Image (cartoon, coloured by chain):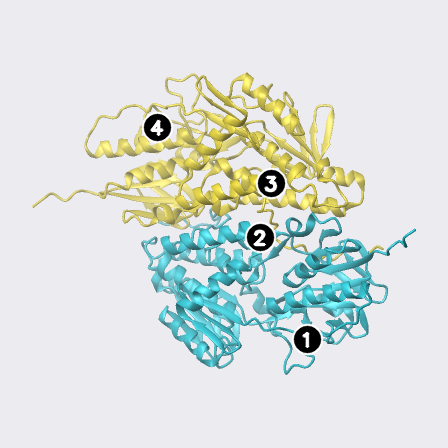
Chain colours: A cyan, B yellow
Amino acid sequence: MPKAIEKKKIVVIGVGFGGLQAIKKLSKDENLEIVAIDKKNHHLFQPLLYQVATAVLSPADIAIPTRSLIGDKKNVTVYLGEVEKIDVQSKKVYFQNHAEDYDYLILAAGAKSSYFGNDHWRKHSIGLKSLRDALSIRTKILTSFEQAELAGDPEETKRLLNYVIIGGGPTGVELAGSIAELSHEIVRNEFHTIDPALAKITLIEASPRLLATFSPKLSEFAKRRLEKRGVEVLTGTKVLEIDDEGVQIEGRRIPSATIIWAAGVQANSIGASLGAPMDRAGRVIVDEYCNLEGHPEVFVIGDIASYSKGLERPLPGVSPVAMQQGRYVASLIHGDVKSKKRKPFRYTDKGSMATIGRQDAVAQVGNFKLKGLLGWLAWLFVHIFYQVGFKNKISIFITWVWSYIAFRAEARLIQDEVEAKADATVTN
Amino acid sequence: MPKAIEKKKIVVIGVGFGGLQAIKKLSKDENLEIVAIDKKNHHLFQPLLYQVATAVLSPADIAIPTRSLIGDKKNVTVYLGEVEKIDVQSKKVYFQNHAEDYDYLILAAGAKSSYFGNDHWRKHSIGLKSLRDALSIRTKILTSFEQAELAGDPEETKRLLNYVIIGGGPTGVELAGSIAELSHEIVRNEFHTIDPALAKITLIEASPRLLATFSPKLSEFAKRRLEKRGVEVLTGTKVLEIDDEGVQIEGRRIPSATIIWAAGVQANSIGASLGAPMDRAGRVIVDEYCNLEGHPEVFVIGDIASYSKGLERPLPGVSPVAMQQGRYVASLIHGDVKSKKRKPFRYTDKGSMATIGRQDAVAQVGNFKLKGLLGWLAWLFVHIFYQVGFKNKISIFITWVWSYIAFRAEARLIQDEVEAKADATVTN
């Protein structure tokens, strides 16, 4: 009689880039039982979130229901819920009135916007981490055009058409280019009392240059191109205050109704419940096996992990890191079953990309660099290729082709209806 | 010196099926100035709203930004706003702190869900008139599956998986068939602790048969087919009460977490500010020229109008009526400019259609009837053909082909994230 194989249970918290890769690989072994917990019901292709914010793509273009991706696998159970507590001693995860035991834990809960201690800024600006964020930004921008059309007062019109983006990383650069295109080009003939081409986009970065992870030459290129597209780029500029009416920088106030925060992230706070050392961004410090120190059964990967073994600085919070770590920890668990010796994680740099606008992007892999049209074509190819799901690839491709030809952004939908103001003073 | 032509100003309230047709036709005459006011920023293809609710289509598939449709015409000004008051004596429309004069007024503000005097039912059920409604229904259904997966308690699981649709017109029938498909087929292998095939869909209609405007044979066919798909159809059944926990009908209580109201509509309440006679559904009674009695410069069309001149009963609130009236009143205004004598409105019946599910629909034009696969193909063709916008036609076509082949509903997105309950009792 064959010996009954003990089923190992793996709990994965978060089905982002890292969690999804781990689950896909683990689920191939039918002797493993996987429980995935996520507070979203979908896997999100975050690099294109800014295109949902600027009304080019729809949420369903860049998000796939988690159950549709992994729910039909017999050894994978999916729960929608937010984890409240992890107890690494008793090996339990607590969420939505439930507790789940584990043999292995993979914590891949990601990151959220960080305001560096100025948490009251969160009230006056919008981050860009979720579909909800993207739709809020979209509504804010579209509503600002509509309100400007009816404003009358020139000062208020100016404030409504000022868009401030804080943070000059890829997200900030892509948003700035994309809002410039939307306001200066796409909708320019559709308003009669205001000229949307008067819209002013300001991109603020505290460090001396945009796109700090790219070469200085590409940073300079991106800055020049953005300026050509009508974006005011302020590098080396610190934000002093954000309120309901605008942004204060040194020596100047920028009145604005739409303030977008793309300046920084901090790890999901659930990491703290592990009781382990964390870095300044709240990321859990892991060893060379992506393990919590002293816990070979607990893996922490992606944006919530700080991996710096043998490196000058911790690995950045980008999708290739998370994906490679996801596959790596799955292979370690597969190896454990076969009692293989663990090998440390090794990251292969896949480079970085950022679009500036139509026919314009920067891309860098090691010393190989692309910019302008070639960079843009590479960007298009990579972003369609890495889409999860065939339907999404097709849908995004068609939408982009259509937007390119017709110069349109057809997802310009304000989902809520305006309501007549109860306190409206009827004037003639 | 040629005589200066006096520019006539036409204010159109509502850019639905009726308003859009009127504006398109009127805008061809450059001597007319058109002002369009709508509380939505988009034109909505309402007949497919149920497919947004059941996660097949995305909002952008069935809605087009109003400005994208008509905003680039030089003689059309678009405002986002809800009209608060119409003064037919001084010929002024008041909205969002503004007042707009008119020479002609076209009131095409549509209808909203009606609860026949039981307004407290609105709190416990969701109508289906706007994108926001459709997304609320979508979230409710998807969340009910997720909560059932975690519920534990069999009674609560049952309640969560009970879906009640009130109203057996085309919207109710289409929703019932579509929810049955979603719960019984599409997601059936993606849940492990519950079986979504246990989902129970109940369609309640007060009158003796479904689809009252179709022939009794087609009504019977639709009922049989829905039952075959697992829908419980209760005709001749009055709803006595709706509360947070379910629906009370005579002799029976149906516990349910998802209650959808598709039973009736009433006209937009702005019609009352005209001070003219209205019918029981709050629709403004118009004469044979779609005019408010005594006001040849005020037209009321579509769902907000009650047109019954020379007819046994008023024209129904369906898109062909609104579209034909929109074109008709535009031609009257064109005729006025040339001092032509007005001819009364004549409606051409284009028939009705309703889908039941995959490969199954009923269609009726006069005495010509289609059902089953043929009805479904006719339905598909008509609903793609009448889409406004080429991109939408393509996008819907591809999504439908994909859903058909892969048997998927890929817009199953809950846009909000779950949040850990603060008061959660952590149990083991």
Q: Position of residue A326 (x, y in %)?
A: 68, 65
Please name which of the two marks, 4 or 2, marks the residue nearer to the observer. Answer: 2
Which mark, residue A307?
1
**Label 1 with label 2: CB-CB less than 8 Å:** no
**Residue B17 point in image, percent of width and height:** 40, 36
Distance CA(mark 4)–CA(mark 3)? 45 Å
Q: Mark 4 highlights which residue?
A: B290
Labels 1, 3: front one: 3
Q: What residue type is disc 1 on?
A: Tyr
What residue lies at 41% left-to-right and 30% top-to-bottom? B320
Residue that mark 2 sits on: A389
Numbered disc 1: what chain?
A: A
Tag 3 residue: B407
Most foreground residue, B81 or A264:
A264
Three-letter residue code for mark 4: Cys
* The quarter of the displayed image where residue B158 is located: top right
Mark 1 and mark 2, same subunit?
A: yes
- For the residue carrying disc 4, how many other residues have a C-alpha within 10 Å: few (<14), some (14-19), or many (20+)? many
SS of the residue under disc 1: loop
* Disc 4 from disc 2: Cα separation: 51 Å
Could you confirm whether marks 4 and 2 are on the same chain?
no
Q: What is the C-alpha distance between the residues marked 1 and 3?
A: 42 Å
Residue located farthest toward the front when viewing the structure as drawn: A1
**SS category of the residue bearing label 4:** loop
Estimate the spatial distance between the alpha carbons at disc 1 and disc 4, rounded to whole Å: 72 Å
Hey, which residue is sitting farthest right in the picture?
A1
Q: Are marks 4 and 3 in contact (CB under 8 Å)?
A: no
